[in-house]
Image: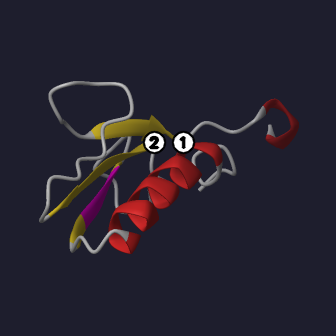
Amino acid sequence: MHAYADSRVMRQVENDVRAAADRGETITHNNKPSYRTNDPSDVVPAGVTIEAHGNRGFRFTPWAQPARPVTTLNEPRPEER
């Protein structure tokens, strides 16, 4: 994964999930990678779809209502290209 997908966006998810867990919620969290092709040698995902919810109402949806999964693209930062 490139640092972009593995830092700023994921930090938001992790902080939100942690806060809900600290409030006593049981969290279900799912990350689903998306690949450009079905070729088995294509091992770096083009993006990751993130979904998280808790047993007391927590929903991870930073930009959307109602709650729905969020897809983060796995693009390299300019300095990584």
Residue segment shown in magenta: 29-33
Q: Is 31 one of the magenta-colored residues?
A: yes
The crowding category of the residue bearing disc 2, from other C-alpha atoms within 10 Å (few below 14, some 14 to 19, many at least 20), is some
Instruction: Say which amino acid is labelled 1.
Output: Asn
Could you tell whether 43 is left or right of 27 in the image? right
Q: Which mark is residue 46?
A: 2
- Relative to 81, residue 14 above or below: below
Q: Position of residue 45 (x, y in %)?
A: 45, 51
| Res. 24 image quadrant | bottom left
- The image shows a total of numbered marks equal to 2
Residue 43 seen in render? no
The quarter holding residue 77 reads: top right
Residue at numbered disc 1: 74
Q: Which mark is residue 66?
A: none
The quarter in which the C terminus is drawn is top right
Disc 1 vs disc 2: Cβ atoms closer than 8 Å? yes
Residue in view at x 37 percent, y 25 percent: 63
Q: Nearer the viewer, residue 81 or 47?
A: 47
Residue placed furthest toward the right: 79
